[in-house]
Amino acid sequence: MKDHRMNTLAENFATYFGQTPDACFAAPGRVNLIGEHTDYNEGYVLPFAIDRLAMIGVKIHDGKAERRLRIASTHGGPVIEVQLHGLSPASVEPWARYVAGVFWALELRGHRLPGADILLDSNVPIGAGLSSSAAIECAVALGLNELLELGLERDELVLICQRAENDFVGAPTGILDQSASLLSTTEHALFLDCRTKETEQIQLPLAANGLTVLVIDTKVSHSHDSGGYKELVRACTQGAQELGVVALRDVGTNRLEEAQRALVPDIYRRVKHIVTENQRVLDTVALLRTHGPAAIGDLLVASHASMRDDFGISCDELDLAVTTSMAAGAIGARMTGGGFGGSAIALLEASRTEEISVAVCEAFDAAGYLRPDIFSVIPGAGARRLS
Ligand code: GAF
């Protein structure tokens, strides 16, 4: 399948740009098993890369040629052409900013880049909370790093991609998505301390335990460069300031009573989610180590309740996906990603996939919601060169 996609990408590249690519690269989307909105609070996250990929074909131009970037997508639309000199978001179509933004961020870091042709082909659903944008950024960053021999480590590429997302695309996100895409390994979840940037690969042997993770894409689309996400970042920053800490990571669960007395209720609820969510990530990692994935269901459910009741980022469709899959026999379920729509995940015995999928679809039909897309994911590899 991947080879087929890669061959098609190379063929399409020739159609768009009249030549073959120098190389093709792929970077995955992710689900976050637990640890939501903790990344920009310098806390803990536990995502894994999924087997849905953004792929790019890249042809680097002759260094002496005009520094022109041409970007196309197999999803259609015209080839976008921009000059690297004076590159700014206003000169690039929104979808192509994830590509151009990486060039911009690398140049900002002092790398003078030649022009290039890039063709994108992605099967990470867009707006589904599965990190389709970071997958594009990471494929581009890895491709440029390898082809131009920039010598950057993967953790440096994470920060380059975050810079592109924050300052070129305009979404004030943390490092969760880019880290998952660049640093994940097969059959593991990535335990990341977003303050120290330390990582640890935590075994996630789903298939060996007869388990699977279902993604339930509610089709309620969201975007993090709009107001909701920014407002949450602002609320968390305010909470940290009022509690006199550098970041909410510094507040333990033992300080929640004090926080409740010190903060207005709206800010307190945001703080409470972050503080309890950090603890849930640590508890999840501990349980995975000692008891395996079947033991983490209650933590997933508690995480969802916290996002719904305290952080305010769920929606009716996500809540229905979670309650229905739990009622139909899932081990645990929660919304995943930034929220305000997107996807829920359900952890379940693989043999119950059909039964639980049908139950969720029927519940969505009965509620008059769009039919969700439901598919299983496996913890896959991080970004890589394909050819
Ligand atoms: C989005 C952001 F991009 C991440 O940085 C993270 O904050 C996530 O929402 C919520 O955990 O995916």
Image (cartoon, helix red, strand yellow):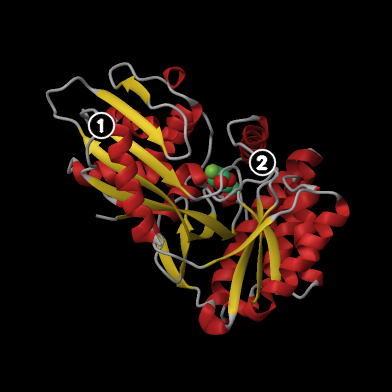
Kindly identify the amino acid type of the residue bearing the numbered disc 1.
Ala
Q: Residue at x 74, y 50 (%)?
A: 258
Kindly identify the amino acid type of the residue bearing the numbered disc 2.
Ser
Q: CA distance from mark 1 to mark 2?
A: 31 Å
Q: With 335 as the anchor, is 191 left or right in this view?
A: left
Depicted 139 relative to depicted 328: above or below? above
Q: Nearer the viewer, residue 290 or 135?
A: 135
Q: With 191 as the anchor, is 9 left or right in this view?
A: left
Question: Which residue lies under the disc numbered 2?
Answer: 221
Numbered disc 2: secondary structure: loop
Q: Which mark is residue 16?
A: none
Q: Position of residue 239 (x, y in %)?
A: 67, 39
Q: Position of residue 295 (x, y in %)?
A: 64, 78
Q: Residue at x 35, y 44 (%)?
A: 56
Question: Which residue lies under the disc numbered 1?
Answer: 116
Q: Quadrant of the N terminus?
A: bottom left
